[in-house]
Amino acid sequence: MDLTVLDRPTWTSRAAAHEARVDELVAPHLARRRSGRKHPVHDFLFTYYSQRPAQLRRWHPGFGVALADAEEYADRKGYAPVEEVAQHPPAVEEVAQHPPVVEEVAQHPPVVEEVAQHPPVVEEVAQHPPVVEEVAQRPSRDHTVSPAHVAGQARLLTSLHALLTATAGRTPQLGCFGLHEWAMVYRADETRHDWPLRLSPEGTDAVVESHRIGCSHFDAFRFFTPEARPRNRLQPGRDDRAAYEQPGCLHAGMDLYKHAFRLTPMVASELVADCFELARDIRVLDMRAAPYDLTDLGFEPVRIETPEGKQEYAEAQRRFAQRGAPLRQRLIDECQRLLAVDLSERFARA
């Protein structure tokens, strides 16, 4: 198995840079959590998605990279000591072509007389036996993500690769105008957030009724009110996401973060953080276009019920699709790379 080995100063520097980056990203959330305050925009990334701040902060180099002198990784999921990589035995054909050189040995027999004159110093050997126990007990210090762990994630890798490639292969659709948030409060007695609506309940319902809803994302569609569900011209399901998701969808863009952290520790943490930053920025647009009045939090509404608001939303949606495309491709490339791992290159234990 070919490995890129990072010495301790190199990998600890990368880990520290990642931790500092994440600390800046999550500090406001942690401060709110300590004081018991909720945020209708930013909490989403930590409550809807299952990745905790401490997990996001933990740095991984990704599969194919070994960390030298990294005892702290010994008990982390998916890692194994580098020394446990099973070495491939020589191919049978190669051994057959290079048999022991018997003739050469026969031509040069041991010099018995010389050996007899210089017998092994038994006493010295006895006093200094090989330190077998010490070598055996010495823990391995270099660690890497094991191929055995990658093999155990084959189903996840296959499903994510199928979803991501299907999504990437479609043209971004920019005509949904964020109406999924409006459909979640359509004719509802209660709203999903403890914030007032920008319009009256009747005005909010009228916006839904005056538009054709085309939500392609199941995890948004499943929160539609029962009255709103038939109004969606698409009916995505839990098991057919790959048939519907498209790169213009804000939730598909945010989900790149979810896909990235599900691939941890097989992918580099820098990629996960890149996807988190995209999701954070998309979430702001998602809620600015929602029916809630969040001006007290500093979020000016994108009034998608107006022609100007629709244009503003579609332009922002296009920019996010452009930002998400290279991240999606990086995840596709990682899935392909991991699915191609030679599973005969395995560790003695996962």
Image: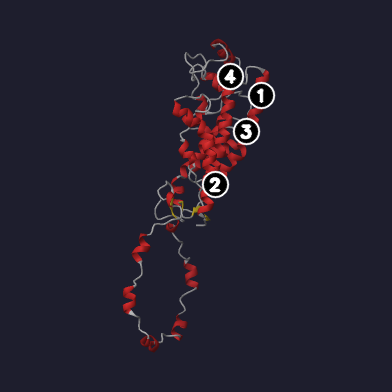
Report x, y in % for residue 189: 47, 13
Disc 2 crowd rating (10 Å Cα; few below 14, some 14-19, many 20+) is some
Look at the numbered disc 4 and give the secondary structure of its residue: helix
Report x, y in % for residue 209: 58, 14
Is residue 298 toward the left or the right of residue 118 in the image? right
- Closer to the chain start, of discs 2 and 3, is 3
- Give the residue at x 45% y 61%: 87
Look at the numbered disc 2 and give the secondary structure of its residue: helix
- Closer to the chain start, of discs 4 and 2, is 4
Residue 312: give its label.
1
Residue 336: give its label.
2
Residue sitting farthest toward the bottom: 113
Q: Nearer the viewer, mark 2 or mark 1?
A: 1
Labels 1 and 4 touching (C-beta < 8 A): no
Q: Name the residue under label 4.
A: 295
Q: Which amino acid does label 1 sit on?
A: Glu
Q: Which amino acid does label 4 sit on?
A: Thr
- Give the residue at x 54% y 52%: 10
* Mark 3 and mark 1: Cα distance apart in space: 14 Å
Disc 4 crowd rating (10 Å Cα; few below 14, some 14-19, many 20+) is few
Count of all numbered marks drawn on residues in the image: 4
Labels 3 and 1 touching (C-beta < 8 A): no
Q: Nearer the viewer, mark 4 or mark 2?
A: 4
